[in-house]
Image (cartoon, coloured by chain):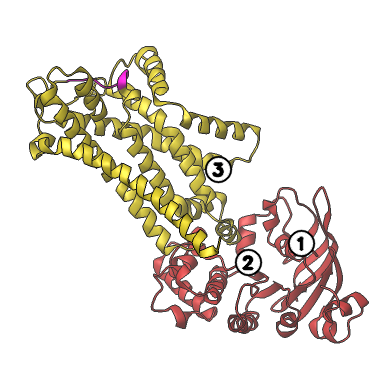
Amino acid sequence: MVKIAVRHLNAYTKKQKILKDITLDIYENAVTAIIGPSGCGKSTFLRSLNRMNDFFEDITIEGEVLLDNKNIYDKDMNVFELRKNVGMVFQRPNPFPKSIFENIAYGLKIHGEKDKKVIEEKVIWALKEANLYEEVKDKLGDSAFSLSGGQQQRLCIARAIAIEPKVLLMDEPASALDPISTIQLERLIEKLKKEFTIVIVTHNIQQAGRISDYTAFFYMGELVEYDKTEKIFTTPKKKLTEDYLEGRFG
Amino acid sequence: MDKTKKEFIFFTIFRFFAFVSVLIVLTLLFYIFSRGLKVISLNFIIDYPRNGFTEGGILPSIVGSIYLLGLASLFAVPIGVLGGIYLSEYTKENTLTNAIRLSIDTLSGIPSIIFGLFGLAVFSKMLGFKISLLSGSLTLSILMLPTIFSATIESLKLVPKDFRDASFALGATKWQTTFEIVLKTAMPNIITGVLLSIGRAIGETAPILFTGATFYTRGLPTSIFEPVMALPYTIYGLLTEGTFPQKQVPIAFGASIVLILIVFIITLPGIIIRNKYRSNKKW
C-alpha cells in the first residue's frame, strides 16, 4: 500500500535547482533507500517529507507530498502534527542534554501526555523497541551523553518512535557509527519496518542492498531510477544506475 | 634552534607571565587583608558605625549594597534575559537587530561614571526620584543590562543546532523548543553571566555616586525613596573625606575585605554551576 505519494516535487533556491520533478510512491511497512552521490538532493528530499526544509528560508518547495492522501504542503496542514506522524533520525546522534529517560519522555510531554505512568510505560516500550532497554535499564536517570555513539543513535530512534509516528525518516543514520553499531542499527531497522514505514538516506550502497525493499537512485536532483531493491541491484534499467552501483563514480 | 629548546624557552616565558599575574592578585589581596583584617570581627558586620565612623561596624553599608544590587537585579535580569532570548531566538539577522547588538556592545564599553550622570539626569532629576535606593538601583541595572544581554545571547548561540532540529523533528513548537531545550541547555551559562554582572556591579561607585549613595544614614533604609549607604561609597568616603584617618582608614580596608568576600560569594555559585555542567556535558 502506498503510504507517501510524492508528485512532481521541485525544490530550488535562487541559485540552483535541488530537486527536479520527483514523482515516486513510498510503500507502507517497507524500507525505502535513497542513494546517490553527495549533493544529489537526497537529504533535501528526505527533509521535504516532514517539512524540515521549512527552516531553510531560501528553499522553495513546489509539488505535492501526499501522506495518506493528504498533501502535507496544504495550507491547513498542522506541521507539528505532521512531524509527530513522520519522525526523523539524523546523521549525527543528537540526544538532548537530558537523562536517557527524559530524552524519550520529552516527545510524549510536548504532545500533551501528562500521566506519569503512561509516560513511563511508553519510554520503556520505545527503549525495548529500539533494542536499547537491556543496556540502559539500570541507568535511565543518567545523562544521554554517557552512552556510546551507537547507543545514542538507538536512543534517538527510541525517542522518535515513542510518539508512535507512521513514518520514520533516517538521514544517513549509520555514517557516524562503528561497524558493530552499524550492524545493530541495520538489524533494528529490519525489525522496525513491521510497524513503521521507513525511508533511509544512505551513502553506503551495500547497506541499501542489505536493508531496503525499494531503492531510489538520485543524481543531480533527478530521480534516475526507482524500483524494488533486488531489481535495481541486479538488473538496473539505466546505465547511470549501473555505473553508480559498480562504483564507477560517486 | 632545536625544538625542545624552543619549547622550553616558550614555556618558561608563559610560566613567568602566568606567575606574574597571580603574584599581582596575591599582592593586592595581601595588602588589603594586612591592613583591614584587624578591624574585622562579628561586630564589624552586624553593628552600626559609631563616633563619626571611627568605631563600630558597617552593617548599613552591607545592607545598602545588597538592597541596591537586589533591586537592580530585579530590573535588569528579566529585561536582559528575556530581551536576549527574543533577539537571539525570535528575530532574524538584519540591519535593525545588528544595530541593537552593536549598541549593546557599545553600552558595555561605556565608563560607569557616564551611567552615573545619566542616572542623575533621568532618575534623580527628570523622574524626581532624587538620591535614593530606587535611582541608584535603576542606574546600576542599566549598567548591568548589556552584560546580561550579551551573556544570554552568547549562551543561546552555544546551544547546538542539532538539539533544535531534534526537537522540531519531534513535532515541538518554537516555544516548546526554546523553553524546554534551548533555554534549559543555555541556563548554566546565562546564570554565570548574570552572577558575574552582579559581582561587577556591586563594586561600582560611580553609578551610585550621584544617584543613590550617601556617606551616613541613621539606621537601615525603610523605603526605596531614601538614600542608602553602600560599601564602595563608604570606602571612598572614608578614604577621601574622613576626618580621623588613623581609625577610619583601617575601617575602609575592613570594608574592602567584606566587599571582596561578597563578590566571591556571589560569583562562586556561577563558577560551580559552570564547572558542573562542563564536566558532564560533551557536545
- Circle 3: is it few (<14), some (14-19), or many (20+) Cα within 10 Å? some
SS under mark 2: strand
Query: Which residue reaches farthest front?
Result: B1
Q: With A67 as the anchor, is B130 left or right in this view? A: left
* Label 1 residue SS: strand
Q: Who is closer to the viewer here, A27 or B59?
A: B59
Circle 2 crowding by C-alpha within 10 Å: few under 14, some 14–19, many from 20: many
Give the magenta-colored segment's residue range.
Answer: B209-216
Q: Chain of mark 1?
A: A
As drawn, the chain in yellow is: B
Which residue in the structure is indicated by mark 1? A65
Q: Which residue is mark 3?
A: B88
Mark 2 highlights which residue? A88
Same chain for labels 2 and 1? Say yes or no.
yes
Q: Closer to the camera: disc 1 or disc 3?
A: 3
A11 lies left or right of A28? right
Mark 1 Cα shell of 10 Å, populated few (<14), some (14-19), many (≥20): many
Q: Is residue A92 visible?
A: yes
Gap between marks 3 and 2 measured at Cα: 26 Å
